[in-house]
Image (cartoon, rainbow, N blue to C red):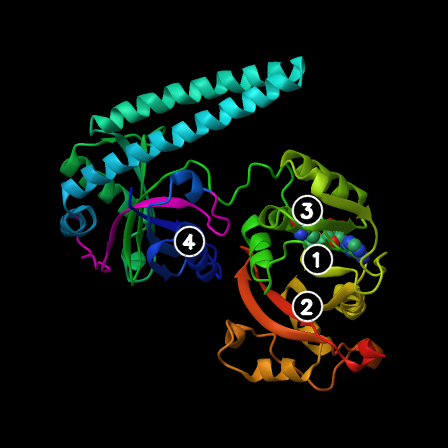
Amino acid sequence: MMKHLYCTAGAGMEELLAEEVQHKLCATQVEQISGRVFFCSNADLHTVTQLKSAERLFLLLRKAEPISLPNNPAKAAAVIKQRVVGDPDIWKQTLLTWTALQEELQGSQQRGHKRRREEDEEESLTVADESTRTLTSSTHLLKRQNETNKESREQTPSFRVSCRCSGVIARSYTSQRLGRIIGMAIKEHLGWKVDLKEPVLEVNVYLSNDHCVVGIPLLKHPLASRSYMKHNGLRSTIAWAMTSLCPKQLNDCVILDPMCGVGAVLLEAAQEYSNAVFLGMDTDTSQLQKAAENLKASGMEGRVQLIRSSAMEIPLADGAVDAVLCDIPFGRKFSCSSDMPTALPRLLREMERVIRVGGHLVLLLSLQLSAQLKKTICTHKNNQYLNSSDTNNVHTDPSNTHNESTDTPKTLLISSLQAQRTHRVSLGSTDAFIHIYTKIQTQAHSH
Ligand SMILES: C[S@@+](CC[C@H](N)C(=O)[O-])C[C@H]1O[C@@H](n2cnc3c(N)ncnc32)[C@H](O)[C@@H]1O
């Protein structure tokens, strides 16, 4: 079935999401705006739920020109009825599609539970007890889902509106107030029942200076919250972006994260590259313990080796790995014994040492550390890249203040890393940069 869908995405992730839907879902009519990517796809819903760069998944109901609202609430309600709610037939059709997709999803969940139950039953009695519990809770969920589907098939589902507005509209109306007006309009126009606590449908409305978007979420949980992450580390979408921005397919490669924390980067990479070998290092035993638990929960424990070690002295030979992916600590969440801007040149030197010529370095860095990075890595290509204006996000990268008079000791300057790309992403409260380098042959290597 061809579906009109959209996903929300963190700032800086829209382009990657647009590429991902084209590549994995063969999506058409792909359009990205700030925080959202729209597309058409006839991929089955289970495949759509495997997207890695998206936050939430919606069935698109309406994408229209922006609206402007009069200050008078009665007049505003009339505009909303006409421009946001519009033709009731579109709502009825979208509701039918939504119900069919819920049934599709339910079917694939049931098949998943059945498969897991069969695997569990083969294992042991204890596990069999656990699967009975899973069965009981999934039976409850299925019962609730069947009631939901019945209500929506009858075309009078309960609903609530969740509204976000920005720009000019936000000066006169709060999102909450607009949500109430839109809710009233849907109730009057379509006869649907408002239920703020446990509605069948959540109607999402986004009104800005440029867009009017209405959609219905297809899943209760965000795509971005991975069920296998027992301990949360780096946002999974960003960890996935670090993997996908690497210029080469990493299958049959050795990949190292020398500051792996709870293993978010390794886990995303291990799922993407089923034939690669992974190494994770950290100085903190409790982080490594959490990484081990995350790996077990995801069924990846056999594919990743964890080692307690410092990234300042990686216990590997020169050129031993094909890629280093690393989220270098900054901010308050991961306090670090060393002063990171001072330690960065030594860390980079060590990472560069273990990468083979032709291999890749992918780093997630704060703005401050990005500036330090640029002072440490100085190649001809790097300077060219810094001056170019066509490389993605370079012009929005405020760390591009390359200064010839660097603080980095000359012995730690690195000339063998060639800049490929810099990509700005949002970590919520702060922005960060993903830097991608390729190690090239230099005179020092050839001797
Ligand atoms: C930003 S966190 C990594 C987060 C990781 N991406 C995750 O998802 O959990 C940085 C990690 O570096 C570790 N670390 C700090 N200094 C280190 C060093 N010298 N060598 C290795 N690991 C170090 C910290 O223990 C922390 O777990």
Is residue 64 located in the magenta-colored stretch of the structure? yes
Q: Name the residue carrying label 4.
A: 21
Ligand 1 near label 3 (Cβ, under 8 Å)?
yes
Q: Which kind of residue does numbered mark 1 sit on?
A: Pro
At 29% from the left and 52% from the top, the residue drawn is 213
The reply to whether the C-beta atoms of the residues labelled 4 and 3 are less than 8 Å apart is: no
Q: Give the mark nearest the N terminus, 2 or 4.
A: 4
At 69% from the left and 60% from the top, the residue drawn is 323
* C-alpha span from label 2 to label 3: 21 Å
The reply to whether the C-beta atoms of the residues labelled 1 and 4 are less than 8 Å apart is: no
Q: Position of residue 90 (x, y in %)?
A: 18, 43
Q: Name the residue carrying label 1.
A: 329
Callout 4: helix, strand or loop? Answer: helix
Q: Position of residue 435 (x, y in %)?
A: 62, 67
The dot on residue 263 is 3
Q: Name the residue carrying label 2.
A: 369
Callout 3: helix, strand or loop? Answer: loop
